Image: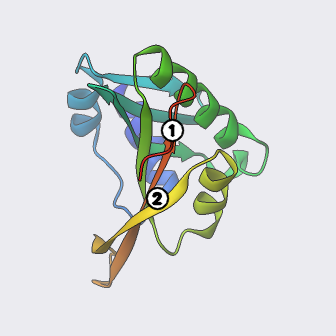
Amino acid sequence: MTPADLARLHALAFVVPRPWSAAEFADLTARADTFLVGTGEGFLLGRVIADEAELLTLAVAPAARRRGLGAALVGVFLEQAAARGAATAFLEVAADNAAAIALYSAAGFARTGLRKGYFRHPDGRRIDALIMVRALNGNPAPA
């Protein structure tokens, strides 16, 4: 998928956080620590720095939701993060995104913190972000 393809799909999937531009995707995908998992209907962008993986974004086209694609992408992300040497994985998710929170919880992520007012809605409202984390490779869960 090209950066323009990623930006188009991201715009279909998101209002909050704001959709990322093709230039932002080009910058991120050019980095050696960042990896892309996905198809034309959905993708996940992650990165591993030192022994920590971050799920940067996960986007699934509205027409392709509720078919297990998001769970499959998260599974591949966890496998690739562990293969790249990560001991833990974390992400930030809008506190009002119940579907995403359920997806990440089912994948073994647990809430570990809160970023107050982290995301901005187009109408100006601020939305908290939950910080979620899980251990990889049989490592103990982070405190």
57 left or right of 101? left
45 left or right of 96? left
Q: Is mark 1 on a helix, strand or loop?
A: loop
Dot 1 crowding, Cα within 10 Å, few <14, some 14–19, many 20+: few
Residue 41 point in image, percent of width and height = 62, 35
- Which residue was labeled with disc 1? 140
Number of labels in the image equals: 2
96 left or right of 113? right
In the rendered image, the vertical position of residue 21 relative to residue 79, given as above or below: below
Residue 79 point in image, percent of width and height = 57, 22
Write down the quadrant of residue 3 in the picture. Answer: top left
* Three-letter code, disc 2: Phe
* Three-letter code, disc 1: Pro
In the rendered image, the vertical position of residue 7 relative to residue 122, given as above or below: above
Residue drawn at the location 37% of the way across and 75% of the way down? 128
Q: What element carries label 2?
A: loop
Q: Which mark sits nearer the N-terminus, 1 or 2?
A: 2
Residue drawn at the location 39% of the way across and 22% of the way down? 35
Find the residue positioned furthest to the right.
67
Residue 52 point in image, percent of width and height = 34, 33
- Which residue was labeled with disc 2? 14
Residue drawn at the location 40% of the way across and 25% of the way down? 86
Marks 1 and 2 sit apart, C-alpha to C-alpha, by: 33 Å
Residue 80 point in image, percent of width and height = 50, 20
